[in-house]
Amino acid sequence: MDRDKLAEIFESQIEIEEKAIKAYEEAMQMIGNFAFRLVFEELLMDSRKHKRIFEVLKQHITLQPSEWDLKLSKKIGEYVSPTEIEAHIKLEEDMIRIIKATAKDVEDETVRRLLEHVLEDENRHHSVLKKLIEQI
């Protein structure tokens, strides 16, 4: 796909995420239930994150893939050392272990589901950090 088409898609996605952000913010004003409010709060944060990802993709669309990889690797090394990333990996592993143990012993279904959801995120974070350390 050519870069102009990608830029158009990214811009369209930015607009969609902006609409989602507004909708989630409005919905949260009306939600009283803590569990549903947490779900919408997470959706809001994810939409903000996705919007930012599309903004960065659009900004860097002019770079060749190999330049992007090289630039990314150099930037990571400038700001975060492998030792620091390893420390974050260890933190994620500790969180995963604790949440797993806690979730299996929780009887309240709502609490357990929320813990399992956090566990999915922590597993994803762990995977991202492992891939990141391989790049530097």
Image: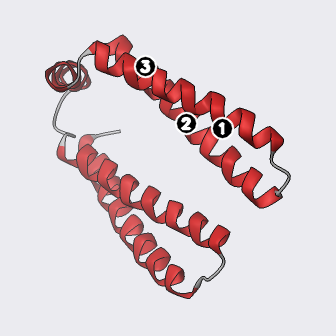
Q: Nearer the viewer, residue 16 or 125?
A: 125
Q: Mark 1 — residue? A: 99
Task: Give me the disc on residue 131.
Answer: 3
- Between the residue at mark 3 and the residue at mark 2, the CA separation in whole angstroms equals 14 Å
Residue at point 55%, 24% (across, down): 93
Point out the frontmost of discs 3 and 2. Answer: 2
Q: Disc 2 vs disc 1: Cβ atoms closer than 8 Å? A: yes
Residue at point 76%, 60% (across, down): 110
Three-letter amino acid code at the position of disc 3: Lys
Residue at point 22%, 40% (across, down): 61
Question: Does 46 sit left or right of 30 as displayed?
Answer: left
Q: Earlier in the sequence, mark 3 or mark 2?
A: 2
Q: Position of residue 48 (x, y in %)?
A: 37, 60
Q: Earlier in the sequence, mark 3 or mark 1?
A: 1
Vertical side of 73 occupied by 121: above or below: below
Residue 98: quadrant of the picture: top right
Classify 10 Å Cα crowding around label 2: few (below 14), some (14-19), many (20 and above). Answer: some
Task: Give me the disc on residue 122.
Answer: 2
Point out the frontmost of discs 3 and 1. Answer: 1
Q: Position of residue 18 (x, y in %)?
A: 36, 70
Question: Does 68 sit left or right of 110 as displayed?
Answer: left
